[in-house]
Amino acid sequence: MPNNQHLSQLIEDALVARNPRGMAQVQPALTAGYCLRAAQVLQSCIKDKPGATVLIGTGFPVVGTFETDGPVGTIALYDTLEYLGAVPVIVCGQPLVGALSERYRTHEIRVGIHADVEADTLAALEHFNPQAIVSIERPGQAEDGGYYNMRGESISERTACFDGFMNWAKCPTIAVGDGGNEIGMGKVIDVLEKLDIVPAVTSADELIVADVSNWGAYGMIAFLGLWHGQDLLAKIEPLAILQYLSDLGSVDGVTRINQLTEDGLPVSEGLSVIDQLRQITGFSH
């Protein structure tokens, strides 16, 4: 079996192999092994601090609702962490938080720019005392403090601020993004000039880039499965999660249509990535 650093490089390459939004060009700006290091943070929560709280921020507003990219990976990671003994909590704004709250532990952050963001964030951090914070496809603040979608349109009025959780937390932070306008991308701000976007400046301790942010969650789960000797990726059912989200009113972030796709890609692409990661970690041949 190859060593963990080599496995991480294989996983990182697999996550950007399709390269629809330039993440393969961003990847070299990161120190290789970021999937491994991110997974080690989560493994530490599970192994060293049983019952540790992990906050997972997600939810990208699209045409009055939320997109499928982000929540799929969040639910997969939530289920994995809970299975392994951690206490995950999904942090998001409306309408996503209302949609997920019946089935999952959630914490609501208020939509729109308001004066109490810092106080609300610090109160939540004190209440939950998280051992790790993960952001999966959350809009990140641009240099002007606003939020923008991949078309360069302002979405500030519809976005809740999760950036403070990353900036003010006393625990390790992990971010996953696929376009350059998400939380975490401040870590590679110098190479985002080549992309046709309004880049996010909010950083994180570890950034995972992927062609679809959901897949970045799978990269972390691949390592957790390896270390626990269980094929945890085989437990993930992206189609079932997409159907659940679709019934709650999700849309594809690219097509803006309520359909069982991720960023314009069929579910078969995500399943292919899962199978590839299972092969890399020795659970599938």
Image (cartoon, grey):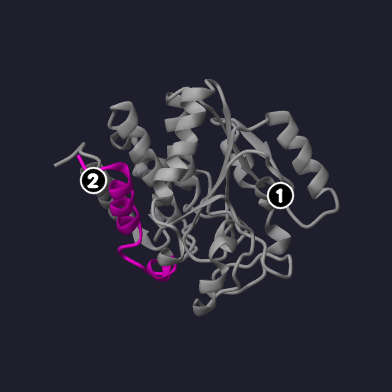
Residue 128 versus residue 122 in the image, above or below: above
> How far from the left and from the top, in percent, is residue 172?
58, 41
Q: Residues within 10 Å of mark 2 (few under 14, many from 20)?
A: some
Q: Which residue is mark 2?
A: 280
Residue type, label 1: Gly
* Residue numbers of the magenta segment: 1-26
In the depicted view, which residue is nearer to us: 10 or 183? Answer: 10
Who's the residue at 80% across and 47% down the image? 118
Who's the residue at 41% across and 64% down the image? 27
N-terminal of the pair, mark 1 or mark 2, is: 1
Who's the residue at 73% across and 61% down the image? 157
Q: Residues within 10 Å of mark 1 (few under 14, many from 20)?
A: some
In the depicted view, which residue is nearer to us: 22 or 101? Answer: 22
From the viewer's perspective, tell me whether residue 277 is left or right of residue 71: left
In the depicted view, which residue is nearer to us: 269 or 43? Answer: 43
Task: Report the Cα–Cα distance between label 1 and label 2.
Answer: 35 Å
From the viewer's perspective, tell me whether residue 163 is left or right of residue 149: right
Q: Which residue is mark 1?
A: 164
Who's the residue at 60% across and 34% down the image? 101
Among the 4 quarters of the image, the one containing residue 30:
bottom left
Q: Secondary structure at mark 1?
A: helix
| Quadrant where the N terminus is found in the figure | top left
Residue type, label 2: Ile
Whether residue 254 is in magenta: the answer is no
**Residues at badges 1 and 2 in contact (C-beta under 8 Å)?**
no
